[in-house]
Image (cartoon, helix red, strand yellow):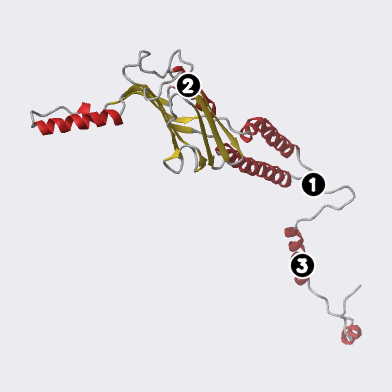
Amino acid sequence: MITVRPTSRWSAILLLLSLVAATPLLAGCLERSTTVGDRFSGTVVVATSPDNPRGAPQLDVPESMASRVTLTDYSTVPESESAAPDGEGSADEGSADEGSADEGAEDEIPYVGTRAVFTDLTSGQFGQLGDIVAAAYGDSAMSMDLTAKRSDDVVRFRGNADLSDLTAGRDLVDLTVVFGGPVTATNGEQIGERTVHWTPEAGKPADFSADATYPDPATAAVSSWSWFIALLCLVVVGLVVRLAFANRDRSPRPGRPRRTPRRDRERRPSSASSSTEARPTEAPPTATDASTGSGPRS
């Protein structure tokens, strides 16, 4: 039976109390992290033609998202209007230029508006993005709902937009989303392993969907903390056992003789043998000594 000395007992108690005090702090690390999770990046464009009486749509980003969203002006101008004539040409060249300008005007529609580049938005902030886009068109009945939910290793993005109040050929909504892993299914245009692009048609309702498959970053963080806490517990238990063994009571038990150290036991036979060798031995008396009386006298 090992009897722990008071010093060792107090040391063990202090270690255990330290572990108990740290448990609530470490337990929070084992919960699913709210700061390490699915993140979404991409761009969104809201624009209209310059002759729209409502004016160009403007995105209003709240302060909570200002550090993750960058706003810039967006505009497109047909090449025929951006290039100025260098000089007078022949009549044929002039007619050819006019024809190309008409074709360019039919192919490209000028837009003015706002482009937003968002980076590492959380699922909640990504959902807010739909309300921000809808509010950009002022008093129109345009609405947009964006949601992203995780099921095991699959992130499912679903969205819908009511663009009935927008005018086709005049208003533009453009959305690009970059997911945290490979996209396995989508109804949009996949332009990369993790990137999907949507350009819904104005004047009609639209749906968005995409599935991306990759491990949950929050779960990976929990797994790392689990190994750390398990290792910490093993170290604490090892220290307690070590202290208990090093400071155990070595006094003899009642009814048992006191144990002699091995070093003392090894010295005793050698000292006894040396004293025996030093003591002179007496020779037994012989017959001659007995007759002459020279033997030992009593």
Q: In this view, does 143 lie above or below 2?
A: above
Residue type at mark 1 is Ile
Q: Which residue is found at the position 42% from the left and 31% from the top?
A: 199
Task: Identify the residue at image location x=85%, y=48%.
Answer: 253
Query: Circle 1 sits in a helix, a strand or a loop, which is it?
Result: loop
Q: Give me the disc on residue 2.
A: 1
Q: How many marks?
A: 3
Give the residue displayed 45% in from the left and 23% down from the top.
203
Quadrant where the C terminus sits is bottom right
Classify 10 Å Cα crowding around label 1: few (below 14), some (14-19), many (20 and above): few
Can you give x and y, in whole percent of width and height, for residue 35 in the image?
A: 54, 30
Measured as percent of width and height from the top left, residue 172 is found at 39, 25
Which is closer to the viewer, label 2 or label 1?
2
Residue 280: which quarter of the image? bottom right
Q: In this view, does 249 lie above or below 282?
A: above
Q: In this view, does 287 lie to the left or right of 24?
A: right
For discs 3 and 1, the disc positioned in front in the rendered view: 1
Front residue of 29 and 188:
188
Q: Does residue 92 appear left or right of residue 270 in this picture?
A: left
Kindly identify the amino acid type of the residue bearing the numbered disc 3: Ser
In which quadrant of the rendered view does residue 290 lie? Answer: bottom right
Mark 2 or 3: in front is 2
Q: Is residue 4 left or right of residue 61?
A: right
Task: Name which of mark 2 and mark 1 comes first in the sequence.
Answer: 1
Tell me how far mark 2 sits from mark 1, CA to CA. Answer: 83 Å
Element on which disc 3 rests: helix
Question: What residue is shown at x 54% (from left), y 42% (from top)?
Answer: 214
Is residue 205 depicted above or below 257 in this figure? above
Rendered image: mark on residue 164 = 2
User: Is 13 in front, or is 71?
Assistant: 71
Which comes before the other along the chain, label 3 or label 1?
Answer: 1
Q: Residue 275: give its label.
A: 3
